[in-house]
Amino acid sequence: MNRLLVPVALVFALVIGPAAVPVHAADAPAESSCAVTWGSLAKSAGPSTSPSSRIRNVRTGRHDCYDRFVVDLAGPASGYNVHYVRRLHQIASGQVISVPGGARLEIIIRAPAVNLQGHATYPGTVGHALPGVNLAGYQTFRSTRYGGTFEGLTQFGLGVRARLPFRVLTVGNHVVVDVAHHW
């Protein structure tokens, strides 16, 4: 009788067993695909300044797992320094700029926002929200501020919901900062 149970159990496992297997990774909820390993420590790269690249525009975008902040440059992507700060201090004067949000990212792009004649290539006003950037409906981003341009560096403040992981990429003529929705 024992010899008969083993083959029956084997057939049962082969026929019924696959129905009991958990869902495939592709069928899993979207949250599992949003796992990030970026961390929240400071990130920097590139040359100390990129005088041939000028800031032209800043724009943002929403994605399933993160919100995106993009700085468009007139030339090749420049260096950057991005880190969380307690307060955003204006790049030239040191005055505190209020950046609403649970946490603040200081984004320094190593490129000016003026041309060689001193004319602005980006229409931001120091201490104010970035022109043309609307954060309504964003999951992570709360506010933006322009810190100005000084000695070949341009500063932006990004208010976020909390201190969350972020990454910085250079893609063509763009510096991209992605901030995850969750840890």
Image: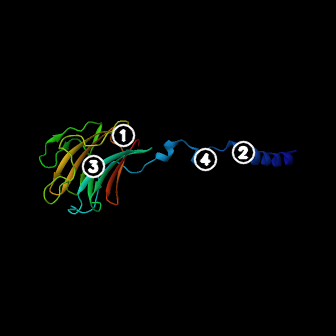
Q: Give how far across and how far down residue 72 sits, in percent.
A: 29, 54
Figure quadrant of the C terminus? top left
Amino acid under disc 2 = Gly
Instruction: Return the mark for residue 17.
Output: 2
Badge 4 marks a residue whose secondary structure is: loop
Q: Give how far across and how far down residue 3 sits, in percent.
A: 85, 48
Mark 1 vs 2, N-terminal side:
2
For the image, the number of numbered tags is 4
- At horizontal 30% and vertical 36% (from top left) the residue drawn is 102
Q: Which picture quadrant has residue 78?
A: bottom left
Instruction: Return the mark for residue 83.
Output: 3
Point out the frontmost of discs 4 and 2: 4
Mark 4 vs 2, N-terminal side:
2
Q: Which picture quadrant has residue 19?
A: top right
Kindly indicate whether the residue at mark 4 contacts the one at mark 3 (C-beta within 8 angstroms): no
Label 3 – label 4 distance at C-alpha: 37 Å
Instruction: Return the mark for residue 140.
Output: 1
Badge 1 marks a residue whose secondary structure is: loop
Q: Give how far across and how far down residue 10 sits, in percent.
A: 78, 48
Q: Residues within 10 Å of mark 1 (few under 14, many from 20)?
A: many
